[in-house]
């Protein structure tokens, strides 16, 4: 019998959307745009970086937001329960600099993500760990003979979800649920955890 491995997205599934919280704190409404709205990640990031430069917001400003972010209600207990029974890896399009601040709130789980390029506190770019890293991570785990169960909420999770042996949407907008009728969709951690247990 294959070992189970669970891969989860972070923002929107376990943690609030960082960029949405930044928009709330700064009053820059355009920063509320996320991968739920723009499926092309590079287009989205260039848009964000342009806004940060325009408003002269640096890593120090963003760090203040990160310091205030707490997990979604019930997320820590859900993740602790999963980690007590399965191997769990978080696959996120966030950045190492963000994860350093966020992961202690979740008990320091393993996370694969990208890296921001910072010069004199200004965020000047970003470096992807590798293109389509969520899907490629799942395929690599499968090559190591893991049965992968995946969960996510956004456009950028779909390739990961479709690559996994079993997958579900969690906290996804209705438009993504409607466009992916073969994927189960959940809004409560208890229901999601119960589905994960039987999905193997």
Image (cartoon, rainbow, N blue to C red):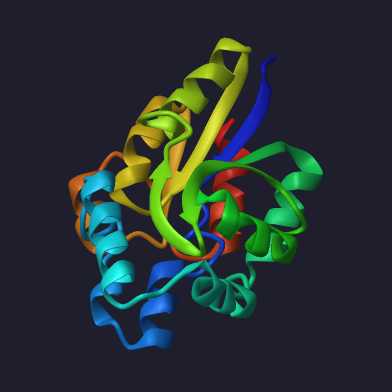
In the rendering, at what x and y percent does residue 155 appear? Answer: 28, 47
Instruction: State left or right for residue 76 relative to residue 6.
Output: right
User: Would residue 183 be seen by someone viewing this image from the given angle?
Assistant: no
Identify which residue, 160 or 113, lies in the foreground: 113
Which of the two residues, 94 or 109, is positioned nearer the viewer here?
94
Write the residue at 62% across / 19% down.
Answer: 146
Vertical comparison of 31 with 48: above or below: below
The picture places residue 56, in percent across and down from the top left corner, at 36, 75
Position of 144 relative to 18 (above/below): above
Figure label count: 0
Instruction: Give the quarter of the image for residue 6.
Output: top right
The residue lying at 26 percent from left, 45 percent from top is: 42
Residue 134 percent location from the top left of the image: 45, 34
Q: x and y percent of residue 61 in the render?
A: 50, 77
Q: Residue furthest right?
A: 84
In-front residue for pair 154/133 = 133
User: Which quadrant does the C terminus fall into?
Assistant: top right
- Does residue 149 appear anywhere in the picture? yes
Q: Is residue 98 above or below residue 166?
A: below
- The residue depicted at 61 percent of the width and 52 percent of the height is 193
Residue 141 figure quarter: top right
Residue 38 image-quadrant placement: bottom left
Quadrant of the frame with the N terminus: top right
Q: Identify which residue is drawn at 58% across, 49% down.
A: 96
């Amino acid at each position: 019998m294959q070992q189970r491995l669970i891969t989860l997205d972070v923002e929107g599934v376990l943690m609030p959307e960082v960029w949405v919280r930044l928009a709330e704190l700064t009053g820059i409404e355009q920063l509320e745009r996320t991968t739920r709205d723009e499926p092309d990640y590079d287009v989205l990031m260039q848009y964000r970086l342009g806004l940060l430069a325009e408003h002269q917001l640096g890593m120090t400003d963003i760090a203040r937001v990160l310091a205030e972010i707490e997990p979604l209600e019930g997320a820590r207990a859900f993740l602790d329960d999963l980690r007590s029974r399965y191997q769990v890896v978080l696959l996120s399009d966030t950045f190492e600099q963000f994860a350093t601040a966020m992961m202690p709130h979740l008990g320091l789980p393993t996370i694969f993500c990208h890296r921001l390029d910072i010069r004199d506190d200004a965020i000047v770019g970003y470096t992807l760990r590798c293109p389509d890293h969520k899907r490629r991570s799942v395929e690599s785990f499968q090559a190591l003979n893991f049965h992968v169960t995946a969960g996510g909420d956004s456009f950028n999770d779909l390739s990961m979800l479709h690559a996994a042996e079993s997958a579900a949407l969690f906290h996804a907008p209705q438009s993504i649920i409607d466009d992916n009728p073969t994927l189960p969709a959940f809004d409560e951690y208890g229901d999601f955890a119960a589905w994960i247990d039987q999905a193997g």
